[in-house]
Amino acid sequence: MTRRAFADVSVGDALPETTVHITRATLVQYAGASLDRNPIHWDERFAQSVGLPDVIAHGMFTMGAAATTVEDWAGDAGAVVELGTRFTKPVVVSYDEGADVVYGGKVTALDEQTRQATLEVSATCGEDKVLGRCTARVQLA
Amino acid sequence: MAVNTDFIGRTYPPTAPYAVSRAKIREFAEAVGATDPVHTDVEAARAAGHADVIATPTFAVMIGQQCDAQYVADPEAGVDYSRVVHGEQRFIHHRPMVAGDEITGTLTIDSIRQAGGHSMVTMRSELNTLAGAPVATSLSTIVVRGGE
């Protein structure tokens, strides 16, 4: 991939919309890789015993997939200099249907001195905004 | 037990070094759907100007959470872990984290605020090389739900 050029970016530019389909297998894989083995993310009996409707995705998985959409837009994973979010709503992952999180976003600011772009990233599951105030700062070429 | 506000500003000693490996970078990248070969292919990473394969932007959470555990597990802190929810997370990357790095984290409790019967604790971990060069800053806010 090639890092996106500052000259090619304008405030208001949209990130391509991408849908990430999450199943139990996605969450087990993330639990293993990240070492976050909390059973609320893979054991529905346990999740329901603590008052959740079903298994929920790791917030850090939802954020990690947001990071992937930002690095794909930037054209270089090393270009993502800052990424932050609030976890506003859980992503409920049913056994039969799984869950779809739709990512998008737009460029909200450009800094000519540093050649950095600030992005606002959106992540929604059904009607729910699952990440709030999710912003990224990207170093452009 | 209430969250102990005496911990505001407290800094913990640096954690034991975390060795960043090619294998863990690959596993983590695959788990978050990252397909840029700079995470998995040393030649592609070098061609992009990196010393070795680089970690995805949220990889540092694994080291940050090792730092945070020191505070959360401290009985004096008054944090009931069964009432903890991850509220906010931010990473500032001073440079990409690369396979071969040995990273140590230094945790500081930046703030403890009360809102709506809950406590919000912001933990900042400075992730540096053993030589002290800054690699990333992790800011993690947990919400400790109030008791009924």
Image (cartoon, helix red, strand yellow):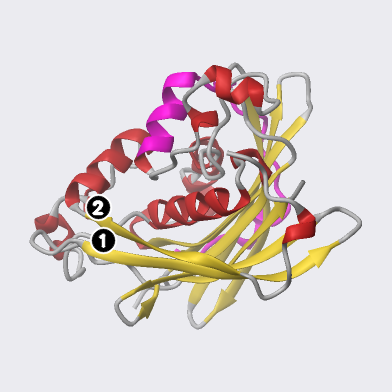
Q: Secondary structure at mark 2?
A: helix
User: Looking at the picture, how far across and down is residue A133, in whole percent?
Assistant: 57, 72
Specify the subunit that label 2 lies on. A
- Nearest to the observer: residue A90 or residue B99: B99
* Residue at the (16%, 65%) spot, across then down: A54
From the viewer's perspective, is residue B4 above or below residue A76?
below
Distance in Å between CA atoms under marks 1 and 2: 5 Å
The residue under label 2 is which amino acid type? Answer: His
* Residue at the (14%, 51%) spot, across then down: A43
Drawn side of residue A36 relative to residue B74, left or right = left
Dot 2 alpha-carbon crowd within 10 angstroms: few under 14, some 14 to 19, many 20 or more: many
Drawn side of residue A31 relative to residue B107, left or right = left
Specify the subunit that label 1 lies on. A
For marks 1 and 2 on the same chain, the one whose residue lies earlier in the sequence: 2
Q: Is residue B8 magenta?
A: yes
Residue B102 in view in this figure: no
Q: Find out whether the residues at labels 1 and 2 contact each other: C-beta distance under 8 Å.
A: yes
- Nearest to the observer: residue B14 or residue A98: A98
Q: Secondary structure at mark 1?
A: loop
| Magenta extent | B1-30
Q: How many marks?
A: 2
Dot 1 corresponds to which residue?
A: A56
| Label placed on residue A41 | 2
From the viewer's perspective, is residue B105 above or below residue A23?
above
Drawn side of residue A9 relative to residue B76, left or right = right
From the viewer's perspective, is residue B121 above or below residue B97?
below
Q: Is residue A1 magenta?
A: no
